[in-house]
Image: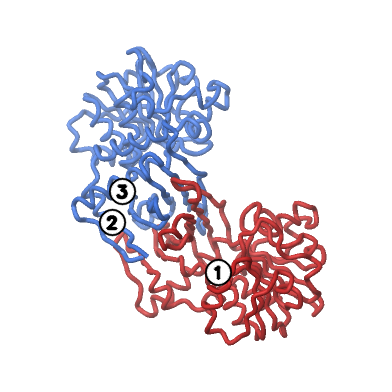
Chain colours: A blue, B red
Amino acid sequence: MGKLAFIAESTVRSIVTRELAFDAVRDAFESVAMNRSEVFDVVIGSGLRDNEIFGVKSGTDIKNRMVGLKVGTYWGGNAEKGLPAHGSTILLLDPDTGVPQVLVSASYLNGYRTAAADAVAVSFLARSDAAVLGVIGAGHQAEHEIRAVAEVRNLSLIKVFTRSETRASWLADRLADIAIEIQFTGAEAAVRGSDIVVTATPSKQPLVRDEWVSEGTHISAMGADTQGKHELDTAIMKRASLFAEYPQQSIRIGEFQHAYGEGLIDSAASVCALGLVTLGHSPGRTSDAELTVFDSSGIAIQDLAMAAAVYEAATQKGLVQFIEL
Amino acid sequence: MGKLAFIAESTVRSIVTRELAFDAVRDAFESVAMNRSEVFDVVIGSGLRDNEIFGVKSGTDIKNRMVGLKVGTYWGGNAEKGLPAHGSTILLLDPDTGVPQVLVSASYLNGYRTAAADAVAVSFLARSDAAVLGVIGAGHQAEHEIRAVAEVRNLSLIKVFTRSETRASWLADRLADIAIEIQFTGAEAAVRGSDIVVTATPSKQPLVRDEWVSEGTHISAMGADTQGKHELDTAIMKRASLFAEYPQQSIRIGEFQHAYGEGLIDSAASVCALGLVTLGHSPGRTSDAELTVFDSSGIAIQDLAMAAAVYEAATQKGLVQFIEL
């Protein structure tokens, strides 16, 4: 029957780096942009109670020879039990036989994976001298976004907007090791004058107003991944160049769903696949005055790439457990 | 992070019985019939090559407190490698936290699970004196169906139709331990005079003609589980009482899709959920002359129930492996 390789969360923690995540996610985006990947329908299921949902995202990456799926869970009541609400598990199938090959306990990994998409976008789309980062949101993911962006640009100031003082002090503590000034501000102040703006909230109402955003800014909209989620004024999209990891999905369930619904985006063809930029097939930013928006809604191909990269690194370090199927 | 319980295939083989499968599947059908379960959309994905597909079936059983999914694979090229083409893996999530709880290597289990649906149907719908079984198909599943039906009725004769002599001799060898006469016949002879008819093929053309089926027969149509699959003349449904594990699915992707498409079945309400019969809420067969048809297309709730039953039995025998997540 063969053996299943298992990567525990403690192993993931000892292996994963921003660089590993960046390279894996960039590879995934390039496969998607070259149409060498297939993303299947996302299933959304529910648990026994309200406020308990799981999603299954699956895909096949022909270029990188990967087949598999991620099960993502959100159990709202976990916080009361001192457990994280979100969880992720990735299963890779052997592309030659379909037999389960690698199982990765990916809850910790998931923050790296999502933030790596942002890092790839900022790396290729933000001005090279971008130094001021504005962040909308102060949850776990905001921490990941800040760390990932700080790897690809020399930041001098980080401005964070959150409505919650508890979250602000939590995030300040978490980022105590970062040698960059962090200010907690209003939403407008977080956006105005920032070279890079990252939104990482579950909002269903736009939080970033068009008039706050100056020319030359790069925005990464990381929050919207289902119908109804919304972080940016749609007017922003009228004057911006638009990018997404998977344009067909961005106009359905990503931030671009709203501009698409209002007719401000004609079709997926109006959005550039980020992988085309990293491959050099598309120019990306063409002037310092250009406003660029990257919409990330997340695709299974990223998850497969992350799992494969972690598996490879764990194999090199002899940290893989094998289970007889 | 907790621990994941893992049940290897060798453990499944040492634990699973027809009785365990029967009870688990009956429980699942009753939960479905009482609307205490939810079945989510099935995803069909593909591998790197043609002839490589995987499906994800997920569900939640509120009555029995189970949440999870099955990944089923079909890799057509495996036969050349001496590997089974079909594979199954079931993942149960902890219903209280969403954290992965039990992983079952379920390829072997799957044959028991599917045949158990047939056994429940035959047990509650076939005449109590049914003694002659006709089987259309002679694959792995046909063996399971025969063994499962033989547990719930005193059979005196089994007639099997297959177009392949190789399959016929394979099946005869497999069933050498069964003390019941087995004849390999034409399709018509397999059906005529049989008290129970089981179809277990991937056919897309009806194989069982209406005029061959006499009054009082019970038919279990086990093959059709996607659009296009078809085993029975739709005329049969005009004079039969109709049953399915999940009527809403049977008229979409099960055998009943064709009679429904032709207007011979009005709606899912014309099909009785088998669980209502096992619960005693619906009469099932009401006379020896009644023709009954059970359409099985398979639902995730069965898989969850099988995994939970195997996990419980493995726990009692101390055969569960635990992996630190």
Q: Quadrant of the N terminus of chain B?
A: bottom left
Q: Are marks 2 and 3 on the same chain?
A: yes
Q: Which mark is residue A108?
A: 3
- Mark 2 or 3, nearer chain start: 2
Residue labelled with disc 1: B166
Q: Are marks 2 and 3 in contact (CB under 8 Å)?
A: no
Residue labelled with disc 2: A8
Classify residue A244 by image quadrant: top left
Label 3 amino acid?
Tyr
Label 1 amino acid?
Thr
Classify residue A164 by image quadrant: top left
Between the C-alphas of marks 1 and 2, the distance is 46 Å
Q: Are marks 1 and 2 in contact (CB under 8 Å)?
A: no
Using the image, determine if residue B75 lies above or below residue B156: above
The kind of secondary structure element at disc 1 is helix
Between the C-alphas of marks 1 and 3, the distance is 51 Å
Residue at the image position 73 percent from the left and 78 percent from the top? B195
Q: Position of residue B258 (x, y in %)?
A: 73, 55
